[in-house]
Structures are given as structure tokens and as C-alpha cells.
Amino acid sequence: MDVDAIREDFPILKKRVHGKKLVYLDNAATTQKPKQVIEAIKEFYSDYNANVQRGVYEISEKATELYEGGRESVAKFINATSSKEIIFVRNATEAINLVANAWAKKNIGKDDEIIISIMEHHSNFVPWQQLAIENNAKIKVVGVDPEGHFKFDEYESLLSDKTKLVAITHVSNVLGTITPVKEIVKKAHEKGAMTLVDGAQSVPHIPVDVQQIGCDFLAFSGHKMLAPTGIGILYGKKEILEKMDPFLKGGDMIKEVHLDSTRWNELPWKFEAGTPNIEGGITMKVAIDYLNRIGMPNIREHEKKLTKYALDAFANTKGIDVYGPRNVEEKGGVVSFNVQQIHPHDLASILDEEGIAIRSGHHCAQPLMENLGLVAASRASFYLYNKEEEIDILINSLKKARKVFRLE
Ligand code: C6P
């Protein structure tokens, strides 16, 4: 991978912050956009901006064709059997809420059980917690071991005939833990339970094949994989989506409307009420083409190298606690840490002065933070354009911060 050449495609990486070169290490929050994506957005608005699925005129037909091309490209990227299985939504959060409202509300009742893990992002936790409260169902939570691995034995012991849904993250946005989703799905299906995989932190970083995993639903966001904000994806197995009623109702999701009845549209449009994020759908293809040109296995290898480099560097720096697995085979490109005696928010401000962007806080995973006995943590997360020298800059700045706080 020619990282220097890749960096040339990302205009923002040339930016200076407080007079320093931007070191962007917050890729789990959102990724930067290559000029190919930025240009494609500009081209849409300059050349063929029109609504989709409606107009019988040239530019609307072009917009529709490219928007649907985006869907095809997503389907291929995750190896869905058909583009009918790809629903465009705003983000991973909306994708999960769609399943909660359009499937779970009807299918999960009193005393039924939903299994999640303690690592879930609030997006894959709050919808299930609230549904359980509304429908008198129960939430069962799989824990992690001291290194942050998913406790598979505990998961097996929680599964029962009452389990109706297993909703699990593929990669933790805090610990970086990669969960054994294929095995998790297999066990859930043996009990007749449905499965949802939160792929927000996996699809952008590791090759993901929904047929191989076998999950019923997969949720992820375009903005974490080079595409713009406001476009997300719900993958669902066709036979399941077909049985589900729509979540949002209005234009586009209908076939026929009469005063006293409505017939729903076919998949996938049944779930896409109203005017969608057209440039988002179109540029999903541009983003995916970019990732495919570099190659997802190469991106994964690159992130493994960076993560190992970061873990070794942290281990060789005084006064730093690191959370999550140490073996990069079991971990995505996410390293959460604390500098002892410095609050993560203070640290993030000091790093900002050095041009370094990291995230600090609870990372929208408060149950996990509580479980780890932490109020907050700092997090560096990597992508295809990051370099080892950026990790050196981070480590040097952490040392500087320790000096500022008179810890060295
Ligand atoms: N995590 C982070 O900094 P949205 O916001 O809908 O695009 O993605 C939600 C989401 C769901 N699951 C996981 C595992 C996630 O990490 C996220 C988003 C960002 O960690 C923003 S809080």
C-alpha cells in the first residue's frame, strides 16, 4: 500500500491546525473523504441534481441510475445475494432503529429475551432496552474478560428458547475487540433466534461477507468508510424484509394509495419513505470503488501494523493504561487508553494544540465504561491513510502532556 499516494487523495490531510500538521486519529468517529468522493458530490449538484425514482427526464433518470448503482455496489461489497437486501437509511443508528420498530416490536413479547454484549454502542443498546421496557421483554448481557474478549461461554449459557434476538457488535468502538460473529450467529440460529450485527466499526475496516456470517441484519454507516454523512445501510435477508411492515410511511414506499388502503412498494423501496440522501447513495459507489482499489485485505493488514505499532509504543511509555485485546488478530484499528492522572478531556485539548485529533469521553458506550470502572478514556483510531510517524507524534505529545502535568 502506497500510503503517501493515498494521502494525496485526501485534501484535509494537508490542513494545519494551530500551526501544526493535522494528525487525524479519530477515524472510528468518522473518516475523511477522498477527492474522488468530494468531486462526485460536486458533479451531482452541478450536473444532474434531480429527485430519484420520479422524473421521466434525463437528469432524474441519471440520478436514479447512479443512486441504484450505489446500492448495487454496497450489495457486492458485503456479498448480499441481491440489492433488494440493501436499505438506504441515514446511519447505523437508524438501521438498528428500523429493525427495532419494524421487526422487533411485533415479534418480541412478554418474557422474550434479547441478548446483547456489554460492548454495545448506545445505538445497539438503547433501542433494545426501550423495546424490552415497552414489550415486557428482558435484556441479557454478555460480558468481556479482563482483556476485553467476548465471553463466548457466557453467551452460550444465556441462549435459551426464550431468546428472540441476538444483537452484537462486530468490532467494539472502544476496545477494538473483534467478536466471533459467525459462531455467535450459528448458535443463535440453533435456538431459532434472529441476529443483528452492528457493523459500524467492521465494514469499513475488514472484509465482511454477510452470507458467510449468516446474520439476518447488518447495520453500518457510510461516513465511517469514506462516504458522506447522512447515508447508512441496513442489510436484511430478503425473505425477512419481505415479511416486515415498513417503518416510515409516506411517498416512494407505496405502490398504490386509496382513501381507505395502501399497498406497499417492493423491496428495498418499501423501507425508503420520502426523498433520500441522493448524493450519499451515489457516492457510496465512489467510496467503495476507492476501498476496493486499495483492497480490503490490504487495509486490514495496514491497520493491524499500525495498531501493533501503537500498542508497542504505549507499552514503552510510562504511566499509560491501555484497554482491550493486545493481539492485533483479535482487534480492529482502535486503541483506547488513559494517561494516568490526566483527565481525557484535558489530554484531548493538549493534543489539539499539537494538531492531533483523538476522541475522549465515554464513546457512546457508557455501560461498557461503567463495567471497566472508567468515567472516560482517550481513543486513537486508524484508517488507510494513517502512518506510523503520526503515532510517534501522538506518543511524543503524550510525553509532553505528562511533563506539563509534572508527572515526569
Ligand atoms: N461510533 C464513535 O466515535 P452512527 O452514529 O449511526 O453513524 O454510528 C453509530 C455507531 C454504532 N455502532 C458502533 C459500534 C459505533 O461505533 C457507532 C458510532 C462513533 O465511536 C460515534 S459515537
Image (spheres, grey):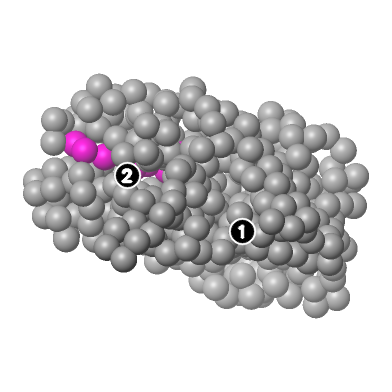
Number of numbered discs overlaid on the protein picture: 2
Identified at 15% across, 31% down, the residue is 160
Pair 2/1: label in front:
1
Label 1, on which residue?
54
Residue 393 x %, y %? 77, 58
Whether residue 92 appears in this view of the structure is: no
In the displayed structure, 329 sits above or below 226; it is above
Which SS type dominates the magenta stretch?
A: strand
Q: Residue at x 35, y 29 (%)?
A: 184
Of residues 30 and 389, the one drawn nearer to the viewer in this rendering: 30
Residue farthest to the left, as pictured:
111
Q: Residue at x 50, y 58 (%)?
A: 252
**What type is the residue that disc 2 sits on?**
Met
Q: Earlier in the sequence, mark 2 or mark 1?
A: 1
Magenta stretch holds residue 166: yes
- Residue identified by numbered label 2: 244
Give yes or no for contact between labels 2 and 1 (Cβ–Cβ under 8 Å).
no
Residue 275 visible somewhere in the drawing: yes
Residue 395, percent from left and from top:
70, 56
Identified by mark 1, the residue type is Arg
In the image: residue 215, left or right of residue 340: left
Q: Is residue 366 magenta?
A: no
**Residue in the image at 58% along x and 47% along y:** 334
Other residues around mark 2 within 10 Å, as few (<14) / some (14–19) / many (≥20): some
How far apart, in angstroms, are the residues tagged by discs 2 and 1? 25 Å
Q: Nearer the viewer, residue 160 or 227?
A: 227
Report the span colored magenta: 163-170
Please state if 30 lies on the left or on the right of 370 as rendered: right
User: In the image, residue 124 lies at what x, y percent?
Assistant: 37, 52
